[in-house]
């Protein structure tokens, strides 16, 4: 698939190297070692996260949780007839009651350990436990090569008011990644499946390891690029977006340089810009 994306010669001649330099600089800001004092977390005998010291203190007395000097282990408690998901649920409540969570989302995400799905847990508990999440994004382009972007609502807990990709969100429990992207595209931008027929398959950009105030973000960032039909006009349905904007490449790059995007959005947008350079050269 080719995109009708053209820039001035002066801008075009330097973009590849400039984008790659910015991308490398960004990686240094989003690839961190685990927080000081955290320990490996195992679930059902498989490594599944990095639990913070504060979260460890909140969970130390729970049934199904065993704290050892080198790691924290979580498993079903047969003695108390607690299946693994019940233990995970009690952990989320204990973290909430202990003030370890930024908010309670009321959404379940899959718990992964060594490539396997082991159970489910409340979304807001993922960061204090350093568990893997999977985020899907849509780089949505217009037919003339401009990029759709969205401003996060000021009511958002994380990065309020900052600019973002048109669509971005976490896959829920039991949800495959393509279904998650279609769902998020509808909730955040009012897009229907027919609007996404020209999209490319999801591709993973990287696994992010980022220290946050509430814990450790371990996240697979995936993106699909799509040229939206000219009739598609984004509209937010879930209250999480305050504004949409269609910007050309120079404007998008200027916004990146000014730090107006979230870290995740900058990563995804830079990846999209870099992927378009070879196609742009071929079309020039």
Image: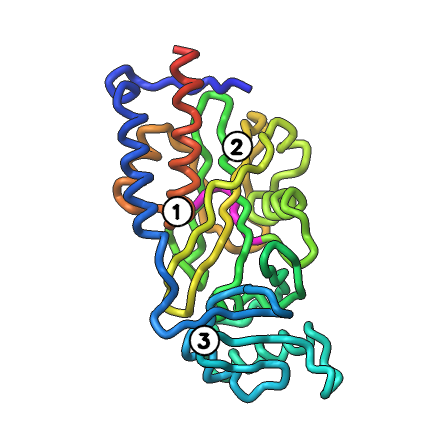
Seen from the viewer's position, the closer of residues 147 and 281 is: 281
Look at the image and say whether residue 232 sits in the magenta stretch: no
Mark 1 and mark 2 lie on one chain; the one further toward the N terminus is: 1
Report how far apart the C-alphas of labels 3 and 2 lie in the structure.
Answer: 42 Å
Residue tagged 2: 225
Q: Residues within 10 Å of mark 2 (few under 14, many from 20)?
A: many
Q: Which mark is residue 163?
A: 1
Give me the residue at 66% from left, 38% from top.
Answer: 192
Report how far apart the C-alphas of labels 3 and 1 lie in the structure.
Answer: 40 Å
102 vs 64: above or below: above
Image quadrant holding the N terminus, namely: top right
Image quadrant holding the C terminus, namely: top left
Q: Nearer the viewer, mark 3 or mark 2?
A: 3
Q: Residue furthest right?
A: 81
Give me the residue at 44% from left, 18% from top.
Answer: 279
Secondary element at image label 3: loop
232 vs 240: above or below: above
Visual colour scheme: rainbow
The range drawn in magenta is 163-170
44 vs 188: above or below: below
Q: Main secondary structure of the magenta part?
A: strand
Q: Residue furthest left?
A: 10
């Amino acid at each position: 698939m080719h995109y009708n994306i053209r820039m001035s010669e002066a801008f075009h001649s330097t973009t590849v190297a400039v984008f790659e330099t910015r991308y490398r600089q960004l990686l240094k800001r989003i690839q961190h070692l685990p927080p000081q004092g955290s320990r490996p977390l195992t679930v059902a005998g498989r490594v599944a996260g990095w639990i913070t010291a504060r979260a460890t203190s909140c969970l130390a007395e729970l049934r199904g949780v065993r704290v050892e000097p080198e790691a924290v282990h979580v498993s079903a408690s047969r003695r108390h007839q607690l299946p693994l998901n019940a233990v995970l649920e009690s952990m989320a409540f204990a973290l909430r009651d202990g003030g370890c969570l930024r908010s309670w989302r009321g959404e379940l995400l899959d718990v992964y350990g060594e490539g396997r799905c082991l159970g489910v847990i409340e979304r807001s508990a993922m960061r204090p436990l350093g568990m893997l999440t999977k985020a899907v994004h849509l780089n949505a382009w217009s037919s003339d090569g401009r990029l759709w972007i969205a401003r996060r609502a000021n009511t958002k807990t994380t990065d309020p008011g900052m600019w973002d990709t048109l669509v971005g969100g976490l896959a829920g429990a039991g949800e495959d990644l393509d279904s998650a992207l279609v769902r998020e595209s509808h909730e955040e931008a009012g897009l229907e499946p027919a609007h996404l027929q020209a999209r490319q398959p999801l591709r993973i950009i990287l696994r992010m390891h980022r220290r946050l105030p509430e814990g450790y973000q371990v996240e697979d960032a995936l993106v699909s690029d799509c040229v939206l039909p000219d009739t598609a006009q984004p509209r937010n349905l879930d209250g999480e977006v305050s504004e949409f904007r269609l910007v050309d490449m120079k404007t998008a790059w200027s916004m990146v340089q000014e730090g107006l995007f979230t870290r995740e959005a900058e990563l995804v947008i830079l990846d999209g810009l870099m992927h378009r350079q070879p196609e742009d050269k071929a079309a020039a």
